[in-house]
Image (cartoon, rainbow, N blue to C red):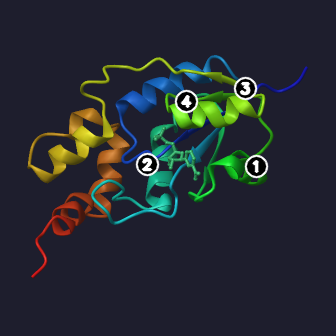
Amino acid sequence: KHTKRALIIGRWQPFHNGHYEIIKKISNEVDELIIGIGSSQRSHSLKDPFTAGERMMMISKSLENLNIRYYTIPISDIDFNSIWVSCVEALTPPFNQVYTGNSLVRELFTEKGYVVKKPELYNRAEYSGTKIRQKMLNNQNWEHLVPKSVVDVIKEIDGVGRIKRLNEKDY
Ligand code: NMN
């Protein structure tokens, strides 16, 4: 029987509890999961503070106790939507299913003939990368919104300090 292998692409800025719940659910539906690290070339900005490598650390430490084989693959953006799916395919193991909530990603993969599923979102109001980054900036509690290992990674790289420094006014 063919291995059921799915792709999920996100920016994971940072990897949070909502992402964890989605992947836990998907791990019951597929044999293997390809986790694309989208916008992998981006880091050190308020919207994309963490490098592809830092995001890979967050993911592999968080998924340590999940019973799924997965591959994390950094995927950089290209200014050429119509060939983006081919670029993704060139970097990943073969897959037959795609999970995304992003309408552009959905459109591009559907046009190439892939089965695209919408992952169920968990507590979207709280588990949002944008809100978590905002909380880090504003000295609010954010640690309860991400897996414990993500707290450790962000501490190790002083991620909160980085975000605060990036937000300082130039003179
Ligand atoms: O669903 P999110 O978390 O927004 O992640 C989607 C990722 O896919 C983003 O990193 C986005 O930049 C990327 N993407 C890239 C292209 C392109 O490079 N042309 C097209 C669609 C999505």
Q: Which callout, 2 or 4, points to the residue nearer the camera?
A: 4
Mark 2 residue crowding within 10 angstroms, few (<14) / some (14–19) / many (20+): many
Q: State the separation of the CA atoms marked 3 and 4.
A: 18 Å
User: Disc 2 marks which residue?
Assistant: 58
User: What label sits on residue 100 in the rendered view?
Assistant: 4
User: What label sits on residue 31 in the rendered view?
Assistant: 3
Upstream in the sequence, badge 3 or badge 1? 3
Query: Tag 3: residue type?
Result: Asp
Q: Which callout, 2 or 1, points to the residue nearer the camera?
A: 1
| Mark 3 vs ligand 1: CB below 8 Å | no
Residue 33 at least partly seen? no
Q: Which callout, 1 or 4, points to the residue nearer the camera?
A: 1
- Total marks drawn? 4
Query: Tag 1: residue type?
Result: Ser
Upstream in the sequence, badge 2 or badge 3? 3
User: Disc 1 marks which residue?
Assistant: 86
- Mark 3 in CB contact with mark 1 (< 8 angstroms): no
State which quarter of the image contains the C terminus. bottom left
Q: Position of residue 106 (x, y in %)?
A: 60, 30
The residue positioned 52% from the left and 21% from the top of the image is 119
Q: Position of residue 25 (x, y in %)?
A: 53, 19
Mark 1 residue crowding within 10 angstroms, few (<14) / some (14–19) / many (20+): few
Would residue 73 appear left or right of 150 to someone viewing this image?
Answer: right
